[in-house]
Amino acid sequence: MAKEKKKPADRVTDAASLEVLTRADEAGVSTVFSRADAQSPHCTFGTQGLCCRLCHMGPCRITPKAPLGVCGADADTIVARNFLREVAGGAAAHCDHGRRLVLLLRDAAQGKAGSYVIKDERALRRAAREYDIEEEGRDAPAVALDLANRFLTEFTSQEQALATLRLAPVTRQNVWDAHDIKPAGIDRMVVECLHRTHMGVDHDYRNLLMHAFRTALADGWGGSRVATIVSDILFGTPSPVRSSANLGVLGADTVNVVVHGHEPALSEMLAVASSDPEVLDYAKAAGASGVTLAGICCTANEILVRHGIPVAGNFLQQELAILTGAVEMMITDVQCCMPSLPEVAAAYHTQVVSTSDIARTIGAEHATFDDEHALESAKALLRKAIDNYARRDRRKMAIPDHQRPLVAGFSVDAIKYMLGGRFRASFRPLNDAIMQGRIKGVVGIVGCSNPNSKLEEYTNALTEELIARNVLVVKTGCAAIASAKEGRLTPEAALAQAGAGLKEVCEAVGMPPVLHMGSCVDNSRILEAATEVVAEGGLGDDLSAVPAVGVAPEWMSEKAVTIGCYFVASGIDVILGHPFHIEGSEKVVKFLNEETAGLFGASFHVAEDSQKAADTIMRLLDARREKLGINRAQERKMLDMKDRRALEV
Ligand code: SF4
Ligand code: MSK
């Protein structure tokens, strides 16, 4: 029986989305929300992971009466195979994004990438040293070429473990060795997922799940980390920047261009082109007061953290942006761009333009993006959007008057700088604050929004609860945008809600209690930060000792499954707002939610509401604090060197 149709107020929390969705519902426009209603209730074979369509003797569905597929596969095998394929999908998406950037770095190093140049030479040289590439006395392009070629072997290596794994604490690398889950080349890992899950290959659910962790590591400590490193080299390492978020960033009198997806290459050039005097003159000649470039999803996060370009919204707002009637062009690249966009745009003047040859949509115009002439391509797209401005029908236009200010751009470098200043950049003050109990721990809230739950309700309630309980919150992806829209990414707003200890530390170092660290691939920055905490000393010698937890409250994509797996394999517990599609196998559930704790020192936990999540998180943080012997009230004083040495003994 179909569920009762939800009202807009049951689906979204923020005023801008509520306003636009109410109009859409009244007009009978199909959106992700109405389609979610139409798809409910979801097939239980699918949600439990019990449907197998891996060969044409099937599809097979496991029931008490038919506990085996035609080939004899049982629920455990089928559930584990489906899970592994999800991890492969997530890793492939992140890593292919990384590969594209590595190829761009290679081309830029050879002067073949037009306007793309090495923007952050410091980041380049640091990365070169990390990968044992000689950099002293050598020109940046020569170093960049060697580094790009080194990165390419991370994709192609057949037997050699990924070099990037060496960026993890040695103790963690030893855990991976002990369980034989150090990945070789990224491409090989993903191919092996497909091979293992082909009919008649790997039937041992444990063996399949261990390969899921191996493949996920190839993402988090491979493709995603490489993507972040290369983005910083080519586009600059983020540092705190002010901007604003929500649909109200669209201009009533400007040409509005919305970029959407994940890859930063084209959007980086659009950011440059959008302030080009020639483009602005062209816009004025068309009767507009300028050009507003804004973003959706992680392309938004990429240009937000580097240029302060405003955020129009997150995943569930992509159609709502078009429904404002004020968007001249939506430019998509890869991942999270709904195929419904051209259909929604059909009732308006909005042009939907796809730019990646691997991501086309029926009804969208396609403009293949050419790296070598990127700036020209970006300007051409903006001119096309400007030409479209005259077609905007102001009777259909309704931009919600809601946007909130924000501060974003907390790379690990930026956090270090905030904590220690330019000359003593260090994580020491954070470690000290955690040891003294002023900060209870660090929680990464990441991932998407999902129409199966009320937009951002869980994410925002949890964030509020955690900072009140003296937990420093770091964020990426659409979860970061949720906080931005709520105004919780400004130091002023968040400090007012922070607990006394967290507030004291944040005020002392001038840092907000909720830190926007970037896009989905930038979850690698969270791992990097946790590694810095370990290296700084006093909080154990492994990531599994650090009082830190990851949370994906409203996740929806395969990438989130992969991210969860590499967090757990890294020794960081993960809370899920809703379970994986694995509940058809008790053994798989037990393995992922319990047995991994014995293997990696961390596991998955499901908490279907924010209060339960907050309680679970505090319990997990407390357990780690107890183990470290720091779970007691300490005198609030800054440690001197003598104290620190004593603590490290
Ligand atoms: Fe059915 Fe086995 Fe084929 Fe899957 S692989 S569809 S369980 S016969
Ligand atoms: S964009 S993967 S909806 S976070 Fe990275 Fe948002 Fe999830 Fe896409």
Image (cartoon, rainbow, N blue to C red):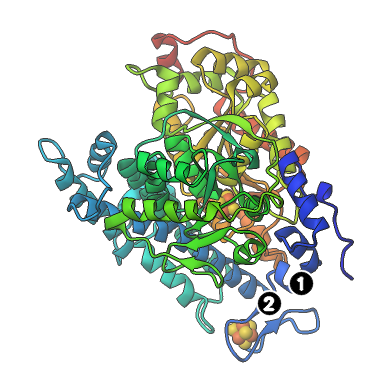
Position of the C terminus by quadrant: top left
Amino acid type, label 2: Cys
Image quarter for ligand 1 equals bottom right
Q: At 77% across and 79% down in the image, what residue appears?
A: 63
- In the picture provided, is 15 more to the left or to the right than 392? right
Q: At 53% across and 67% down in the image, what residue appears?
A: 364
Residue 459 picture quarter: top right
Q: At 83% across and 46% down in the image, what residue appears?
A: 9
- In the picture provided, is 30 more to the left or to the right than 311? right
Q: CA distance from mark 1 to mark 2?
A: 10 Å
Q: Which residue is tagged 1?
A: 43
In the depicted view, which residue is nearer to us: 283 or 72?
Answer: 283
Asked whether residue 304 is in view, the answer is: yes
CB atoms at circles 1 and 2 under 8 Å apart? yes
Tell me the tag on residue 51.
2
Name above or below for residue 49 compared with residue 274: below
In the depicted view, which residue is nearer to us: 157 or 610?
Answer: 610
Local packing at callout 1 (Cα closer than 10 Å; few below 14, some 14-19, many 20+) is few
Amino acid type, label 1: Cys
Residue 394 percent across, percent down from the top left: 67, 49
